[in-house]
Structure formats: structure tokens, C-alpha cells
Image (cartoon, helix red, strand yellow):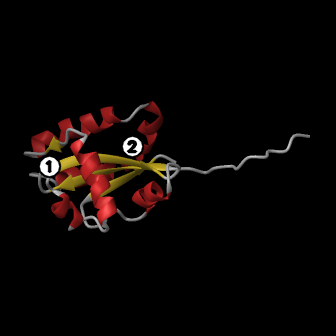
Amino acid sequence: MKIKQSFITNSSSSSFIVAWDKKIEKRDINYINERVMFIEKAQQVLKDSIDQSPFFIESQKDMKKVLEKLMDYYDDTDYKCLEDEKPAIKDLLRKSIGKWIYVYSYCDENSEFFAEMEHGDTFKNLPYVRVSHH
């Protein structure tokens, strides 16, 4: 009989579709820190914001285009997770005319810090939808 000697992990990852009032720029740490609690989290969100091209929703006509781009963002394994959240995403987009949409992904297996980014209400002061990839 074989006995497993290593740890069994139950890691998870989530992505967050977040609506911001403005396009994030390198100098916006104070703007982010006013909305994301703790400077370390705000710094990570700033870094992750600068590394992507956000979607701007100018009018309701843009919602369908942004939704299609979001669907393209996810691979086939995550598509089911995204489908489950599609009504909430549509609602977020409908309420986000004039806002910038960013997507952040965090996994709790990387470190305690990233577990906190994923599970610690990082975006609770902003309009967002969490897509769980469990």
C-alpha cells in the first residue's frame, strides 16, 4: 500500500472584474489606496492595473463589445465559471457607463499575501464581480 507523504493542497484562484471611475496611471497610488484598504494591496493593484489595457464603457453600445472581450479573456477551462457570473457581469457593465473596466486575477497558492488579495475583500469599496475558478 502506498501512503501519500506530501501535503494535499486545495488552492483556488479568482478574477475580479472591477469598474474604476478613471483610467489608472502610474501616479495613482493615493487614488487606489482610498478605495483599496492597505497600502500593500493598493501597490499590487496599481502594478496590476498598469500592466493591462482596460476597457472603457462610453455607452450602452459598448457593453456587448466589452462583454465579448471579457469572454475572450478567459480560456475554455474558465469559461464555465464566467458563464455562471454572466448576469452579474452584465449588471456591472450596465451600471458602469463612463467607467474603466479592469480584470485582476489572484491565486491563494502563491503566498499569504495573494491569498489575502483573493479572499480579503480587496475590492469591496468598488463595483466589481468576482469570478471564482475553483
Q: Going 16% across and 49% down the picture, which residue do you hit?
A: 26
* Residue 87 against residue 41 in the figure, above or below: above
Q: Is residue 94 left or right of residue 124?
A: left
Instruction: Name the amino acid, label 2.
Output: Leu
> Is residue 82 in view from this perspective?
yes
Of the numbered discs 2 and 1, the one sitting upstream in the chain is 1
Nearer to us: label 2 or label 1: 1
Crowd rating for badge 1 (residues with CA inside 10 Å; few <14, some 14–19, many 20+): few
What separation in Å lies between label 2 and label 1 (alpha carbons)? 28 Å
Of the pair 22 and 46, the residue shown nearer to us: 46
* Residue 66 against residue 46 in the figure, above or below: above
Q: Going 41% across and 32% down the picture, which residue do you hit?
A: 75
Position of the N terminus by quadrant = top right
Q: Is residue 64 left or right of residue 122?
A: left
* Residue 39 against residue 25 in the figure, above or below: below
- The residue carrying mark 2 is 82
Asked where in the image residue 73 lies, by quadrant, the reply is top left
- The residue carrying mark 1 is 25
